[in-house]
Amino acid sequence: MSDKAWSGRFSKSTDKLVEQFTQSISFDHRLLEHDIAGSIAHAKMLGKCGIISQAEAEQIVQGLQAVLADAKAGKVEFDPSAEDVHMNVERLLFAKIGEIAGKLHTARSRNDQVCLDIRLYLRQQIVSILSLLASLQRVIVDKAEEHAESIMPGFTHLQHAQPVTLGHHLMAWFWMLERDKARLASCKERVNVCPLGSGALAGTMLPIDRELTARELGFDKVSENSIDAVSDRDFAAEFAADCAVLMTHLSRFSEEIILWSTPEFGFIELDDSVATGSSLMPQKKNPDVAELIRGKCARVIGHTVTLLTLQKGLPLAYNRDLQEDKEPLFDTVDTVTGALQAFELMLDTAKFNVRRMREAALQGFPTATDLAEHLVRQGVPFRTAHEQVGKLVAWCIENGKELTDLSIDEIRRFAPNAKPSALEEITLDSSVERRSSFGGTAPHEVRRQIEKARKILSEAQSSKSLDHP
Ligand code: ARG
């Protein structure tokens, strides 16, 4: 079967350059297992509906299984002149079972087939990314629990703002990743729709049963409109966009790890097994994993833009441009998968320097707001309290003192309404302990978050058995 599937109408063979330019087998071979799964379901349906005989269907299914086994054993060679994975599978099937192979493509077009393959692939990859996300979240929650009381400076504008606990800071990342999971899980609902049976664009005259194939392949529903089914890649753009948000989270978190591992911060030490050295400077230990995650985020943002740009000018229905959807999608999956695994390892093996964080938290008047609030409780208008504490801070800067070095008399020189209890209230521990509003940084609030997070993770774990493979 060296002829093209369309050779009937053609009097010349395809130019080699065109063959090379238009082929997609060099990358879409990654869809092989899904292409075969889709074809097996399709063949069974054709047999059940009497469009081909049961015996033929059986022969095709066995042939496809044999092709899959060969592929898994690394025993298949793809032929670029067979263009894409769909034609290559048919070619390999022909080699197994002969002419009957030609019946597989009954009531089907590569237009609905390719869309089916991508949906099966993405469904599987979303499940795997969701589980990597949950695994990273588990590491975050463990670290947060360990550090529910470890005090660090909280930042705004990268300036010391108010003291927080490391546990609280880490849990912020937990919730961001939780939303990434929700976005991807929701995307999966739109991915999990079966396009098979849409044909080239208009459906088919043959008496197919679309529900049957959809059920066989574990889809939630069948697509309602055949033109929509073969044209649309919005689910692919949506997936990439969700991954771009996720990568942006990992990139931001990486940025913190990069900053925190500098001697200026000294908050974290990365394990030797996840750091790299310099070929020139013997003293260096570099946070390359974090830097590369930050860097690779750019690719995923780029792929999102690619997938949108690819579609923005396309008339309905299928256009060959859509073949260009695969490489950005595959690379998105590879990048996100690698980044999640590497990030988890980096965080899991990292050591936080609690003493250093606490020392840093003491610098820069982090409890100035607490003193102002103390004055407010004594009846001082907030604006006045702000002004008084501001002047006190300026005096401290001039005299090389921190707020916690001061006596009550020194404080009263600027804030006459201050009570002796102010001294206790402007310590780091009290500052953190008393920020106990819901979602605040007080250790018991952080523990409440952790408990809730663990519940979310274990509920997701136990409903996992309902998921697709
Ligand atoms: N390789 C093609 C793609 O990825 C498969 C569909 C080709 N359809 C066609 N009518 N040429 O989009």
Image: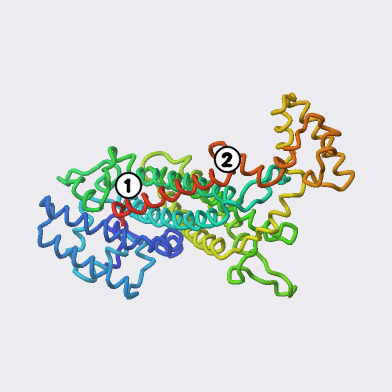
**For this view, does 75 lie left or right of residue 286?**
left
Residue at the image point whose x is 64% and y is 54% from the top: 255
**For this view, does 331 lie left or right of residue 68?**
right
Label of residue 98 in the image: none
Residue at the image point whose x is 62% and y is 71% from the top: 272
Is residue 467 in view?
yes
Residue 259 vs residue 296, the one in the foreground: 259
Residue at the image point whose x is 17% and y is 46% from the top: 209
Residue 254 vs residue 103, the one in the foreground: 254
Sequence order check: which comes first, mark 2 or mark 1?
A: 1
**For this view, does 215 lie left or right of residue 292?**
left
Q: Dot 2: what SS?
A: loop
Residue 381: image quadrant is top right
Q: Position of residue 111 (x, y in %)?
A: 32, 49
Is residue 307 in view?
no
Label of residue 192 in the image: 1
Q: Position of residue 301 (x, y in %)?
A: 55, 49
Q: Position of residue 457 (x, y in %)?
A: 41, 51
Image quadrant for the C terminus?
bottom left
Please name the residue that numbered disc 2 is placed on.
Answer: 440
Furthest toward the right, the residue is 398
**What is the crowding at mark 1: few (fewer than 14 residues within 10 Å), some, or many (at least 20)?**
many
Queried on whether the Cβ of the residue with tag 2 lies below 8 angstroms from ligand 1, the answer reads: no
Q: Dot 1: what SS?
A: loop
